[in-house]
Amino acid sequence: MLSVIAYGLAVVLSLFCVFIGARFLFAPQASAAGYGVPAKDGDSAYLTIKGVRDLSYGLLGLALIAFTSADAVAWYMLVVALCPLADTVIVLRHGGTKAVAFGVHFATAVVVLLNAVLLFAL
């Protein structure tokens, strides 16, 4: 049962990264506002970089789930949790709300870290 929960959560988190990355590529302005820091004119390169980053993280997560061990996926989740932690700081430092910083980004980091713990337990 723990295996199903741990891998299920890993799949959901990875698919969510794919979705976020694709959204930043296809609807960058709306995605930036949802991220917590609205984009300004001329920010399109940075929004594209974020989209490619998140899309790549999601696809890498799915590949690791499909082709490696629980330990490899756990280490990946542990390392990838740095991104939403950094996003929390970025939102706070650039005028975003605490609600988005902690309710979205920090909460995501906690869930990713929890997933790493579950995967290490397998």
Image (tube, rainbow, N blue to C red):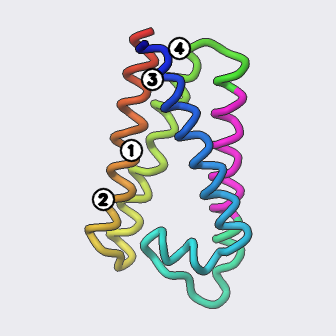
Q: Residue at x 33, y 63 (%)?
A: 101
The residue tagged 4 is: 71
Q: Are marks 2 and 3 in contact (CB under 8 Å)?
A: no
Q: Residues within 10 Å of mark 2 (few under 14, many from 20)?
A: few
Q: Residue at x 43, y 13 (%)?
A: 1
Which circle, 4 or 2, is nearer the viewer? 2
Question: Quick check: 35 left or right of 106?
Answer: right
Q: Earlier in the sequence, mark 4 or mark 2?
A: 4
Q: Quadrant of residue 100?
A: bottom left
Q: Residues within 10 Å of mark 1 (few under 14, many from 20)?
A: many
Three-letter code, disc 3: Ile
Q: What span is in magenta?
A: 49-63
Which circle, 2 or 3, is nearer the viewer? 3
Q: Earlier in the sequence, mark 2 or mark 1?
A: 2
Which circle, 3 or 1, is nearer the viewer? 3
Which circle, 2 or 1, is nearer the viewer? 2
Q: Secondary structure at mark 1?
A: helix
Q: CA distance from mark 2 to mark 3?
A: 23 Å
Q: Earlier in the sequence, mark 1 or mark 4?
A: 4
Q: Secondary structure at mark 2?
A: helix
The residue tagged 2 is: 103
Q: Are marks 4 and 3 in contact (CB under 8 Å)?
A: no
Q: CA distance from mark 4 to mark 3?
A: 15 Å
Coordinates of residue 36 in the picture (x, y in percent): 42, 72
Q: Which mark is residue 109?
A: 1
The residue tagged 3 is: 5
Three-letter code, disc 2: Gly
Which circle, 4 or 3, is nearer the viewer? 3
